[in-house]
Amino acid sequence: MPRALHLDFETCSAVNLKEVGAHVYARHPSTQVICASYALDDQVVCSTDFRTKLDGLAHVDTLIQQGVVLHGWNVVFERLIWNHVVAPKMGFDPVFPDQTVCTMATGACYGLPLKLETAARVAGSPHLKNTDGHAVMLRMARPRSTNPDVWWHECDPPKLAALIDYNRDDVEAERAISKLLPRMTYFERRVWLADQRMNDRGIPVDGGFLNRAHNIIILELNRLNMQINDITKGEVETVNQVGRLTKWLQDRGYPTGFGIGKDDIETVLRLPTNLTPSALAALSIRQEAAKSSTAKLKAIDQFAPMSERARGLVQYGGAVRTLRWAGRGPQLQNFPRPSIKHVGIAANAIANGIDPECLRELFGPPLEVISSCLRGAFKAPDGQKFVVCDFSGIEARVLAWLAGHMRALNVFRRGEDIYAATAASIGSNSRQLGKVLVLACGYGMGPGRFMETANAPPYSLGLSVQAAEQAV
C-alpha cells in the first residue's frame, strides 16, 4: 500500500469560495496560501507559511514524485490549490486525481457526515477537530473591510499563529479518521475518479445566452418595478421591497401570517379572501418577478467567469447514504420544470437577441420564458451534442424491490408507468400526484408533510388537508 501524505491548506482570496466554487477560487489571481500543514504516515505534523514562501512544500513535492499518495478531507481543494497556486509559483509538477485519496468521499461511502468535526465524532475518532479556530479562519480568508489591500496574516501575528494551530489540528483530525475507515471499494474508487475528471472538465457555457438573458431580466424588472410603483402610488417602489409590499397588501385584505414568497402567494390565492383588485394586480406582478431565475443565472456566471466552462457543479456522495451526487453552484439537478412549449426555439431566440416584447408575443411572459430556458445557458461545442439520460423511476423500482411489493413490481414488468398507476389506484388521473405519492409515502412521509411537499414547487398540486390524508 502506498504511503499516505496528509495535507491541508489555509488560503485567502478576494472571491468567496462558496459563491464561485473551488475551481474558480483556485484559479483567481488574488488567491494565495497563508499556511500549509502536512504529515507523512504517523510522523509529526510539519507546517510552513507565507513568511517562508512555502519552501517547506518542496519536501511534499519530492514525496509525491516518489509515489506517496496525497490524502485530505475534500482533497479536491488541496489538489486545485496545489495545481493553480502552489505549483506555478514554486515550479512543482501538478497533482492528478489518481494521486489522491479523499477521506471525506471515503467516509461518505460508509455513511459518515461530510463535515470533518461531525464525522470525527460519529466515527469515534480519538482526535476530534478543534472548532475554536473556525471563526479566525473565516475572517482571515477574506479581505479586511477597513483595508482590503492588506491581509490579516500580514499584519496580525496572533491571528496567524492561531490559524497555523487550526491548520495543524485539521491534519491531525483528518489523519485520525482516515485510519478508522476501510478503503473505497474498487468500483467506488473508479466512480470517484470519474467524478473528479468530470468536474475538472466542466460544462461549456453559452455566453451570448447569459448576457442577453440578463439584459431581458433587467428590462423586465424595471418594467415591473414601474408597475408596482404606479399601483401602490409610490408606497412600494420595487417588487423586492418585501416589508413595504407586505404591509401595503395587508391593508388591502392580504391575510396576516403569510409572507409574499411564491409558495405563500399561491396558497393565499386559493383561500377565500377580500383582496382588492389593486392587491390582486400587485400580487400578479410579484409572482411574475419571482420567476426571474436571476440567482441561477448569477451562479452560472460565478462558476464560469468570462463565459468559460462551469466546473465543480456536482459533488460525489453529497447525498450521504445513497451516494448520489449533490448539485453545487447553479444546482443543475434542480432547474425549474419548463412551463412553456418550444423551449429550444425560445432559448435560441434569447441567445440571438430577441426583443423582450417579441419574446412575450411569441412565447409568454419573458421572465417565465427565461426560467423555462435556463438549460440554454449551456451549449455543446461545435460538432457535438449533449446526450441527456436518466434512470427510469429508479427510486420507485428499488423501493418496490426492497419491500417485496409485488403489485408495484408487476407494474414495472408490464412496462407501465408506476406514477400513473399509483394515481389511478386512488381515483386520480394526475401523474404528478402519483409521483409525489410514491416518492413521499414510499419513504415514510405522513399526511402533513405530504401535503406540504405536494403543494410546493415543482408539484404545486393544491391539495386540501382532507385530500392529502385520503391519498396517504
Image (tube, rainbow, N blue to C red):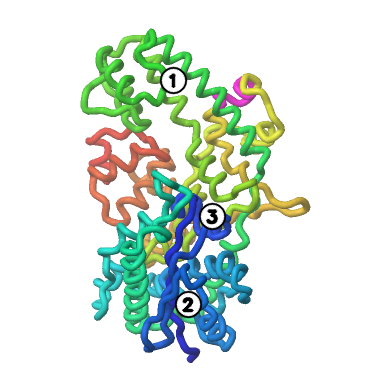
Going 23% across and 44% down the picture, which residue do you hit?
447
Q: Marks 1/2: CA distance?
A: 51 Å
Work out whether mark 2 precedes mark 3 in sequence or the reverse, and give the earlier one.
3
Q: Earlier in the sequence, mark 1 or mark 2?
A: 2
In depth, the one of 323 and 436 nearer the eye is 323
- Does the magenta portion include 234? no
In the rendered image, residue 364 lying in the magenta stretch gets the answer yes
| Inter-mark Cα distance, 3 to 1 | 41 Å
Nearest the viewer among 259 and 186 is: 259
User: Which mark, residue 101?
Assistant: 2
For label 1, the residue is 285
Quarter holding residue 265: top left
**Residue segment shown in magenta:** 359-366
Would residue 113 be seen by someone viewing this image from the given angle? no
Residue 20 spot, x, y in % from top left:
50, 51
Q: Secondary structure at mark 2?
A: strand
Residue 285 placement (x, y as % from top left): 44, 20
Q: Which residue is mark 3?
A: 30
Q: Nearer the viewer, residue 471 or 79?
A: 79
Image mark count: 3
Label 2 is placed on what type of residue?
Val
269 lies above or below 377: above
Q: Is residue 391 left or right of residue 104?
A: right
Secondary structure under tag 1 reads helix
Determine the CA span between mark 2 and mark 3. Answer: 27 Å
User: What percent of the width, then of the height, locates residue 324?
Assistant: 44, 62
- Count residues near mark 3 (Cα–Cα under 10 Å), then give few for <14, some for 14-19, many for 20+: few
Magenta residues, dominant SS class: helix
